[in-house]
Amino acid sequence: MQSNEVILSVNNLVKDFPLGQSAKSNVMRAVNDVSFELKKGEALAIVGESGSGKSTGARILTRIYDETSGNISFKGVPLNTYIEQNGALEYARQVQMIFQDPFGSLNPVHTIYHHIARPLLIHKRAAKEAVPQLVYDLLELVGLSPVKETAEKFPHELSGGQRQRVAIARALAVDPEVILADEPISMLDVSVRLGILNLMADLKDKHGISFMYITHDIATARYFAEKTAVMYVGHMVEWGASDNVTQNPQHPYSKLLLSAVPEAGKAGRRELMVKKGDIPLWKPDSVGCPFYMRCPNASEQCQTQMPEPVQIAPEHFARCHNL
């Protein structure tokens, strides 16, 4: 059910965090000049290692954090204007988040029924007498049967994969347009990860839900998402159609991520194309390419000048002086 309708639009997004209690000028820049569009029924994968700004961007979109600068639009309307006109609760209904830890995001003293019924009641999605059947329908939709027995259980009585399915059902309860999935499979057993990805793909394809899929695993990005953006130290360094980014990576950091993916039938360690170097603490006055310290092809220009985006193909862009 993918369409050309743009649900979320982000332009030149910046987020700074203060370092301790010192002066305002002593800040770190967690997100720097990030721009992307998310269309209805489309999945955008945000890929990068810890500290790359992936989750910070999602928390800005859910209004957990305010942006330092930049423009965000929802359904073609500036986000602050949309919230003023429709209310923060309505925006929260339409943009839901699935967190990395399926146990930490569920209240251990409440049943599964409570977790799914509560958003239905808060957002007034159904009359009280209709809630039980809706809860059971949602559990059925995410593959948790038998539904009545599952609803009566507590989070600790379920497996990690089952708990993540509950988190997905809770997000679906309010009929969202967008789901921000923050590392939804990283804490699950390998054997159940594919099931969760297939569930999200089914929701995307059959129900038209847009996904922003945050992950450190570039291999799953290609499997699930139509588009992929690779982030490093708060910067988008390569982005475009997932097939282009993963099959023909151009930025040295994208190549590094792909070289770290295990390949079936190949034993032993592979050489990673990267220099040993520190990951920089990026600040508003930092200059150059953020990957300079670790890039095997870095030049003096890379140290002093931020690369401009280069178009490699119709749906493929990267920031690198050596392209």
Image (cartoon, rainbow, N blue to C red):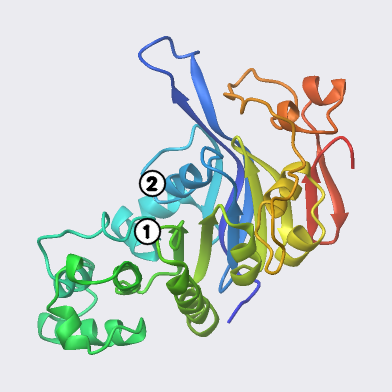
**Vertical relation: 182 (above or below) 129:** above
Q: Earlier in the sequence, mark 1 or mark 2?
A: 2
- Which percent across, then down, holds residue 7? 54, 64
Front residue of 277 and 105: 277
Quadrant of the rendering where the N terminus is positioned: bottom right
Front residue of 156 and 265: 265
Q: Quadrant of residue 176?
A: bottom left
Residue at point 56%, 74% (across, down): 41
Front residue of 174 and 322: 322
Residue at point 43%, 54% (across, down): 82
Dots 1 and 2: beta carbons under 8 Å? yes
Left or right of 266 in this view: 89: left
**Vertical relation: 180 (above or below) 59:** below
Q: Quadrant of residue 275?
A: top right
Quadrant of the rendering where the C terminus is positioned: top right
**Can you identify the residue that label 1 sits on?**
91
Give the residue type that dot 1 points to.
Answer: Tyr
Q: Quadrant of residue 145?
A: bottom left
Classify 10 Å Cα crowding around label 2: few (below 14), some (14-19), many (20 and above).
some
- Which percent across, then down, holds residue 11? 62, 45
**Can you identify the residue that label 2 sits on?**
63
